[in-house]
Image (spheres, rainbow, N blue to C red):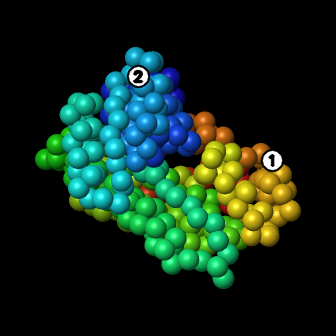
């Protein structure tokens, strides 16, 4: 692909304040897209947008709780107004609460379902409405939902999280079918990232130790590496590059897939 394969495109990235989301936003910007960062973390979100703006990229920030329908409406409207359009959605916002099944708390399970499942489907809802013919953007586009390798393997202590990411995978495929059959001009795919040493990833490693599944963090991380044929953890740039591909014209005939970016862990 060319270095500017997304020139002229307009992207909204949820959970874009830090971690995977910030890296995805930076990768899209390097590929030529304008970027709207959406997050509940205002200070970090604005800082993420400001860092991208330094590279002479049109960008902005909008505060967004992905579980709130009205906030999605405002976020999409601001994206269209600020960027002059909207044709890429990256549904990245998500949470993970580690727990053995025997110790799961109902409130934690409900919160993960609300953010990871409801948040993702609301993102698709408002992307479809904006991008389809007659919508405020109306030129079609691409949606990439961030699932997880946890949707493809049985990893202990993350049962509910795994279930929510499996739901993201299924919703991706239904979304792709609906968007295609209804003539929206929107492709919908998802990515299964492997474990990444972000704050969220390392919190999982620490939590695995706390629940007694590993003697220390190094052992917890080492067990993941041992299960990964390519012999390392994922990096945020691995995910960013995969997202750019799925949003690009090179992926123009790809929809309804789950792309593993996990070093082979989930094969």
Front residue of this view, candidates 153 and 98: 98
Dot 2 crowding, Cα within 10 Å, few <14, some 14–19, many 20+:
some
Front residue of this view, candidates 238 and 43: 43
Dot 1 crowding, Cα within 10 Å, few <14, some 14–19, many 20+:
some
**Residue found 13% across the figure and 47% down from its top:** 134
**Residue found 46% across the figure and 67% down from its top:** 111
> SS class of the residue under badge 2?
helix
- The answer to whether mark 1 and mark 2 are in CB contact below 8 A is no
- Does residue 196 appear to the left or right of 54 in the view shown? right
Q: Position of residue 261 (x, y in %)?
A: 62, 49
Front residue of this view, candidates 145 and 259: 145
The answer to whether residue 106 is above or below residue 46 is: below
The answer to whether residue 227 is above or below residue 1 is: below
- Does residue 168 appear to the left or right of 155 in the view shown? left
- Does residue 210 appear to the left or right of 54 in the view shown? right
The answer to whether residue 196 is above or below residue 180 is: above
User: What's the mark number on residue 231?
Assistant: 1
Q: Quadrant of residue 236?
A: top right
Q: Is residue 110 visible in the rendered structure shown here?
A: yes
> SS class of the residue under badge 1?
loop
Q: First in sequence, mark 1 or 2: give its number.
A: 2
Q: Quadrant of residue 226?
A: bottom right
User: What's the mark number on residue 53?
Assistant: 2
Q: Position of residue 30 (x, y in %)?
A: 48, 25
**Residue situated furthest left in the rendering:** 134
**Residue found 86% across the figure and 62% down from its top:** 215
């Amino acid at each position: 692909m060319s270095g500017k394969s997304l020139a002229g495109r307009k992207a909204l990235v949820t959970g874009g304040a830090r971690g995977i989301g910030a890296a995805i936003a930076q990768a899209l910007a390097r590929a030529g897209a304008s970027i709207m960062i959406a997050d509940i973390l205002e200070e970090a979100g604005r800082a993420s947008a400001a860092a991208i703006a330094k590279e002479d990229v049109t960008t902005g920030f909008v505060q967004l709780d992905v579980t709130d329908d009205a906030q999605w409406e405002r976020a999409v409207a601001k994206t269209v107004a600020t960027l002059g359009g909207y044709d890429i959605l990256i549904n990245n916002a998500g949470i993970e609460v580690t727990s053995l099944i025997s110790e799961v708390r109902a409130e934690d399970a409900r919160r993960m379902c609300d953010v990871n499942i409801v948040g993702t489907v609301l993102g698709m809802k408002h992307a479809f409405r904006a991008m389809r013919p007659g919508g405020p953007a109306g030129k079609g586009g691409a949606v990439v939902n961030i699932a997880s390798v946890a949707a493809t393997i049985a990893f202990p202590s993350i049962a509910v999280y795994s279930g929510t990411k499996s739901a993201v995978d299924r919703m991706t495929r239904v979304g792709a079918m609906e968007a295609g059959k209804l003539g929206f001009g929107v492709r919908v795919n998802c990515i299964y990232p492997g474990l990444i040493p972000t704050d969220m990833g390392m919190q999982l490693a620490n939590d695995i130790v706390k629940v007694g599944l590993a003697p220390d963090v190094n052992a917890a991380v080492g067990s993941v590496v041992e299960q990964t044929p390519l012999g390392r953890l994922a990096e945020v740039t691995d995910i960013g590059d995969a997202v750019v591909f799925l949003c690009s014209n090179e992926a123009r005939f790809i929809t309804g897939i789950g792309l593993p970016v996990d070093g082979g862990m989930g094969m």
